[in-house]
Image (spheres, helix red, strand yellow):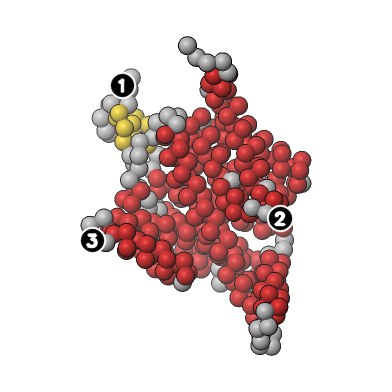
Amino acid sequence: MPRAGQRPVKTLLANPYAVGILAGLTAALVAAAPLGGTAFLTLLSPFPLLVATLGYGLSAGVAGSIVAMGLTLALSGLQPAIGLGMLICLPSVLAGTLGALARPASELGGPDDTLVWFPLADILLALCGAAALAFIILSALSGTEHELASEVARSLVASYQEGGVALPDDFEGQLETLLRSVLPIVQPFGWVLTLVFNFYVALQLARRAGVLNRPRDDWPTSLRMPRLALVPFAIALLASFAPGMAGYLAAGVAGAFGAGFAVAGFAMLHEWSRSQNGRLLILGGSYVAVLFFAPLLAGFVIAGLFDTKRASPLSPGPVE
């Protein structure tokens, strides 16, 4: 016999709108973590909405997004609410919805009793596109593409001076110029990596909770970018050399799609290392090397460019 209080919880968790509202509240509070000095929690802000959308559908994701943006609007204003919507809500609901999509294999010439799930490569492409779109819209709205570079350069110079470090003349100006070139690439690049990490963890939790039907993807063999992604990446890379705001925005788009190819490159390393002795040493050494020497990421981006494919997981499905 169920214990007292058990039934309302089960009823609540069976309602996609209730789950979405809880997820939206959590996402908004976690996204506001920097206000409490725990900025690292912001990296987990897409997670609640991803789990809700993967397990309970688009309605849960939309409900959660409305609540998250509404709460942020009430507490912080319009621009932070738009930022949360573009950076967190849009990619989370998009990836969660696509991750739960399946179609009968018979529609593609396969057996009648099999389902084909949305390719992991296309989900990665969608995350890159969402991050690029968010970067463009938020940069256009703010109209302060150089303020962050100036602020970071000023802070770094101040910290060096406090430590008694002798700096050359015009060091702050040179550092600001460098940051203006690097930051538009680094920001969307890092956010794509964050979204992929959250999506992976959300898949595991939703599956363990029994609310996800999608079978396990073999990420080392399936996590690639589709060939279509080469087009926006190449165009954005070339356009990034343009002066002014156009080049700035193009660099951000290149950074977002470059992150997708870098993730594919790491997946290729995982696949190759399966047949090697000392696999953990190879993987651990590679991640540590990239952590301490970020330019090595370019090698993984290049590797990802040469292995574009779309693999779909299969699972048994009802015969209609």
Q: Nearer the viewer, mark 2 or mark 3?
A: 3
Count of numbered circles on the image: 3
* Location of residue 224 with respect to 26 vertically, above or below: below
Answer few, some or many: residues within 10 Å of disc 2's Cα (few below 14, many 20 plus, some between 14 and 19): few
Q: Are marks 2 and 1 in contact (CB under 8 Å)?
A: no
Determine which residue is flagged by label 3: 277
Answer few, some or many: residues within 10 Å of disc 1's Cα (few below 14, many 20 plus, some between 14 and 19): few
Q: In terms of depth relative to the viewer, which is nearer, 15 or 249?
A: 15
Q: Amino acid at mark 3?
A: Asn
Q: Quadrant of the C terminus?
A: top left
Give the mark, 3 or 1, whose residue is nearer the N terminus.
3
Determine which residue is flagged by label 1: 319
Q: Position of residue 213 (x, y in %)?
A: 40, 31
Q: Which mark is residue 66?
A: none
Determine which residue is flagged by label 2: 141
Q: Amino acid at mark 1?
A: Val
